[in-house]
Image: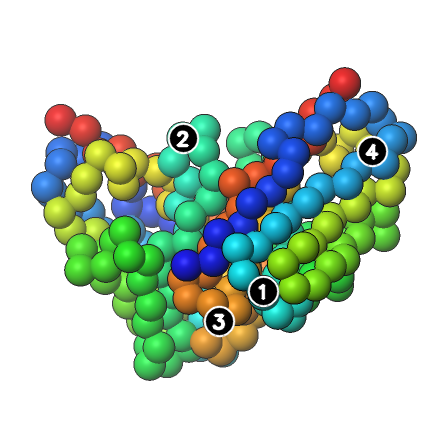
């Protein structure tokens, strides 16, 4: 199982960024995917989850209305569109595989992609 | 939102000693939805315990989880050098799913 995030970088407040997560080594469309973030030197925060068929999508209140999660099962990929970025969105963003169709434990993690929001 | 409070913030122990980490929930959580993760410096977290007491694949039996309701515990029976890390509890029984703030287990 491998999860590889990409798309992070330095962005100004108010701008947008799109993260990607490419998955391999498992039957991708059998599992939900979560995004989790970790600000530098701090703890873990769940950001968003998408079920196997995109039928169940949830967001943390801190990103609701600004972030959009999506997946393309044909490409074994999940995306996180992040709009109107704020300084407090600065973090390492992890893509994680869930243990179930709609949710579950985070049994595999990528190495993360760093998003820095600063002017 | 369910708040998970972990204690202590830092645990200073020697290899071979027993570590006991606590996770207290602001309201009752089904043990089916309580888990523990380990994170070493520069690495992604990894799943240790799910369903409060079941070890994830490949996790040594010196790690054990217990508890119910609002009080959960992760125990490391005899600390190995590779066990010094930060440990997080997590619940996904209620939305939003939440993590504790972490307990750092450091070498004394």
First in sequence, mark 4 or 1: give its number: 1
Q: Which residue is mark 1?
A: B28
Q: Give neighbour class at mark 1: few <14, some 14-19, many 20+ (Cα, 10 Å).
A: few
Query: Where does the image place residue A55, in percent across and percent down from the top left?
Result: 33, 81
**CA–CA distance between discs 4 and 1?**
32 Å
Q: Chain of mark 1?
A: B
Residue at (42, 40) in percent of width and height? A38
| x 87%, y 42%: residue | B77
Q: Which mark is residue A80?
A: none
Q: Say whether marks 3 and 4 touch (CB < 8 Å).
A: no
Q: Position of residue A34 (x, y in %)?
A: 42, 61
Report crowding for label 2: few under 14, some 14 to 19, many 20 or more residues within 10 A (C-alpha). Answer: few
Image point (17%, 43%), residue name: A85
Badge 4 element: loop
Q: What residue is disc 3 on?
A: A103
Disc 2 marks which residue?
Answer: A40
Do badges 2 and 3 share one subunit?
Answer: yes
Q: Residue at the top extreme?
A: B108
Q: CA distance from mark 3 to mark 4?
A: 32 Å
Instruction: Assess whether mark 4 and mark 2 are in contact (beta carbons under 8 angstroms).
Output: no
Q: Position of residue A88 (x, y in %)?
A: 26, 37
Alpha carbon distance from label 2 to label 1 = 31 Å
Choose mark 2 or mark 1, whichever is in front: 1
Label 1 residue SS: strand
């Amino acid at each position: 199982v491998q999860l590889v995030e990409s798309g992070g970088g330095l962005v100004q407040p108010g701008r947008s960024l799109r993260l990607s997560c490419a998955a391999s080594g498992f039957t991708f469309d059998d599992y939900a995917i979560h995004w989790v973030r970790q600000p530098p030197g701090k703890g873990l925060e769940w950001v968003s989850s998408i079920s196997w068929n995109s039928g169940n999508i949830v967001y943390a209140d801190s990103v609701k209305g600004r972030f959009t999660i999506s997946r393309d099962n044909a490409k074994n990929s999940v995306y996180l569109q992040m709009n109107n970025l704020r300084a407090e969105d600065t973090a390492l963003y992890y893509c994680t595989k869930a243990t179930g169709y709609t949710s579950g434990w985070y049994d595999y993690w990528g190495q993360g992609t760093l998003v820095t929001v600063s002017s | 939102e369910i708040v998970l409070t972990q204690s202590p913030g830092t645990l200073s122990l020697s290899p071979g000693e027993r570590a006991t980490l606590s996770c207290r929930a602001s309201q009752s959580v089904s043990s089916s939805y309580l888990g523990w993760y380990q994170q070493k410096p520069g690495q992604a977290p990894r799943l240790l315990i799910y369903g409060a007491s079941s070890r994830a694949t490949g996790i040594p039996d010196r790690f054990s989880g217990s508890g119910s309701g609002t009080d959960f515990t992760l125990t490391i029976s005899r600390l190995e050098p590779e066990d010094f890390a930060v440990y997080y509890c997590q619940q996904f029984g209620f939305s939003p799913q939440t993590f504790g703030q972490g307990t750092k287990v450091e070498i004394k």
